[in-house]
Image (cartoon, rainbow, N blue to C red):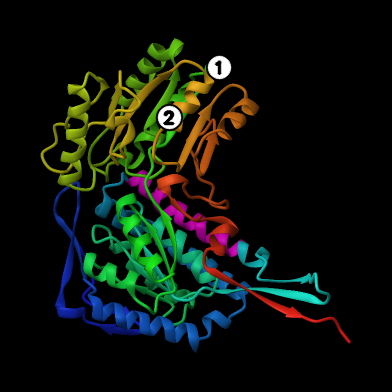
């Protein structure tokens, strides 16, 4: 049980407006595992005031980028020392299996901090160019200002660090709004950041519901908003930011495709990675490759292999070392996913493996499910379910595979599997997706830009491109010497 009674704003503890709190319940046990203050509009106002003071009069924006990078390095070391604590918190909040909480949740966050410490010394913070009018132009990259960072529950620490690290490196104060379902790890992040040497007001954690969140997005003292979450909420945030000409980065939904070409070798590793790519964290990751496209001539063979692998997945207590999949986040999410599977079955889809709930006394569990005999245009093949459900779709030839892969409103990630890497890279280049892996389900590299096309989002996170999201460019034109 982890309890936080107060908010920490500008170095001072503050009781939340109206004394409101948010309860955090485990999706595995349905028991209370934490309680945090719920920030209201007045708390948002106080946090923005502190952040603007840190921006306009504090040392952080005027600290050399290399020194800011060293603070991120110290933050990474401190979080590494709390890996077990963080993994337990995230497993309690989200239901991630313990093994995956360590590697897929905490490990990725540490990787982001390591990458950004390195970027500090290589990013072009300032450069001089020759002017076409004679003389020179000094191009400076300055902090964009106060950043509102809004993150989801499915990977709470990783998505927070993916925003906080580049924004802090750019010199921006950050107001981090974690999800009400999973706010606990954000408090550990803030504690470690202060210990690493981050000045007061530069990072504030504000758990909030819809009222506080919208107030943050609308606040005139916030210069940029970075959001990860659903396309529906991201659309609303984009509309609000556009009204005030406020910069925003939106990392939204996906319905990613894994394309198996006709020459793919169906090894144990390939089958395992395909299943992990669709089912990791119970399918609750934005880049889950839940549409598996296979050549029609090999459909039966591949469906059998994938069905056997899905059927072997162990569902249960996230704390158990042999658990592969934990629960989904809530009873509402479980029921919504079940309805989608039932509707697909009613329309003629075949359940190859799984379907329904496992025989467990408590928790929001679903059996991992593999489906085939589905029209590529059917809802089960088009809608982001955010659950442990994958569909196998046959195609006729390479052009047909590309057409089906691109036939969604999304464009976030994907993968191509083949014995010929050059061919795989060529097919990857034809997919409408921000990131595509060849012969791997890892369609995200921490040192490279990540983000979506179409309704999967705007802007990029990760690598130097992610830092650029938090800078403004200023050109100083200098005349030639007399």
Q: Residue at x 51, y 17 (%)?
A: 397
Q: Quarter of the image for the C terminus: give it.
A: bottom right
Answer left or right for 199 relative to 4. Answer: right
The secondary structure that most of the magenta stretch takes on is: helix
Answer left or right for 320 relative to 143. Answer: left
Measured as percent of width and height from the top left, residue 247 is found at 46, 67
Tag of residue 263? 1
Q: Residue at x 40, y 71 (%)?
A: 244
- Quadrant assignment, res 45: bottom left
Q: Residue at x 44, y 78 (%)?
A: 202
Closest to the observer: 26 or 209? 209
Can residue 183 be seen here?
yes
Measured as percent of width and height from the top left, residue 120 is found at 62, 67
Could you tell me how many numbered marks the image carries? 2
Answer left or right for 137 relative to 271. Answer: right
Measured as percent of width and height from the top left, residue 477 is found at 73, 78
Outermost residue on the right side: it is 482
Is the residue 68 above or below the residue 266 in the image?
A: below
**Of helix, strand and loop, which one carries label 1?**
loop
Within-10-Å neighbours for mark 1: few <14, some 14–19, many 20+: few
Is the residue 480 above or below the residue 248 in the image?
A: below
Range of the magenta residues? 98-118
Task: Give the label, 1 or 2, closer to the camera.
Answer: 1
Which residue matches tag 2? 274
Mark toward the start of the polypeptide (1 vs 2): 1
Could you tell me how far apart the alpha carbons at marks 1 and 2 are, in whole angstroms?
A: 16 Å
**Of helix, strand and loop, which one carries label 2?**
helix
Is the residue 209 above or below the residue 356 in the image?
A: below
Measured as percent of width and height from the top left, residue 112 is found at 51, 57
Can residue 80 be seen here?
no
Answer left or right for 251 relative to 124. Answer: left
**Residue 103 shown in magenta:** yes
């Amino acid at each position: 049980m982890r309890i936080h009674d107060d908010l920490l704003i500008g170095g001072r503890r503050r009781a939340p407006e109206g004394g409101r709190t948010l309860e955090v319940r485990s999706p595995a046990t349905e028991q209370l595992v934490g309680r945090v203050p719920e920030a209201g509009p007045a708390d948002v106002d106080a946090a923005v005031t502190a952040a603007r003071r840190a921006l306009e009069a504090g040392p952080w924006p005027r600290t050399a980028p290399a020194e800011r990078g060293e603070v991120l390095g110290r933050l990474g070391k401190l979080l590494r020392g709390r890996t077990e604590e963080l993994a337990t918190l995230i497993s309690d909040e989200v239901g991630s299996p313990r093994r995956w909480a360590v590697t897929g949740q905490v490990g990725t966050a540490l990787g982001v901090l390591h990458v950004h410490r390195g970027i500090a010394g290589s990013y072009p913070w300032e450069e001089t160019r020759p002017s076409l009018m004679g003389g020179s132009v000094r191009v400076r990259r300055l902090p964009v200002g106060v950043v509102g960072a809004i993150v989801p529950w499915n990977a709470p620490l990783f998505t927070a660090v993916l925003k906080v690290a580049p924004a802090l490196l750019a010199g921006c104060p950050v107001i981090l709004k974690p999800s009400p379902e999973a706010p606990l790890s954000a408090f550990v992040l803030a504690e470690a950041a202060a210990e690493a040497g981050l000045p007061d007001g530069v990072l504030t954690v504000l758990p909030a519901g819809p009222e506080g969140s919208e107030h943050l997005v609308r606040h005139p003292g916030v210069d940029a908003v970075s959001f990860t979450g659903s396309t529906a909420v991201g659309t609303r945030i984009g509309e609000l930011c556009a009204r005030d000409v406020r910069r925003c980065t939106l990392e939204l939904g996906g319905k990613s495709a894994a394309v198996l070409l006709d020459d793919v070798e169906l090894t144990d590793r390939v089958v395992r990675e395909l299943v992990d790519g669709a089912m990791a964290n119970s399918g609750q990751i934005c880049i889950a490759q839940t549409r598996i496209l296979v050549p029609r001539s090999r459909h039966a063979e591949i469906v059998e292999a994938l069905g056997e692998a899905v059927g072997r997945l162990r569902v249960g207590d996230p704390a158990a070392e042999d658990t592969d999949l934990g629960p989904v986040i809530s009873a509402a999410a479980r029921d919504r996913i079940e309805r989608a599977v039932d509707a697909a079955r009613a329309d003629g889809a075949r359940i190859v493996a799984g379907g329904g709930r496992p025989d467990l006394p408590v928790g929001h569990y679903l059996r991992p499910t593999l489906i085939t005999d589905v029209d590529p245009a059917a809802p089960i093949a088009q809608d982001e379910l955010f659950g442990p459900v994958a569909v196998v779709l046959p195609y006729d030839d390479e052009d047909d595979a590309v057409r089906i892969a691109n036939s969604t409103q999304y464009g976030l990630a994907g993968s191509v599997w083949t014995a010929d890497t050059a061919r795989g890279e060529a097919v990857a280049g034809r997919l409408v997706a921000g990131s595509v892996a060849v012969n791997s389900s890892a369609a995200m590299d921490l040192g490279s830009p990540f983000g979506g096309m179409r309704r999967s989002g705007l802007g990029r996170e990760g690598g130097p491109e992610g830092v650029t999201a938090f800078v403004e460019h200023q050109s100083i034109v200098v005349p030639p010497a007399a």
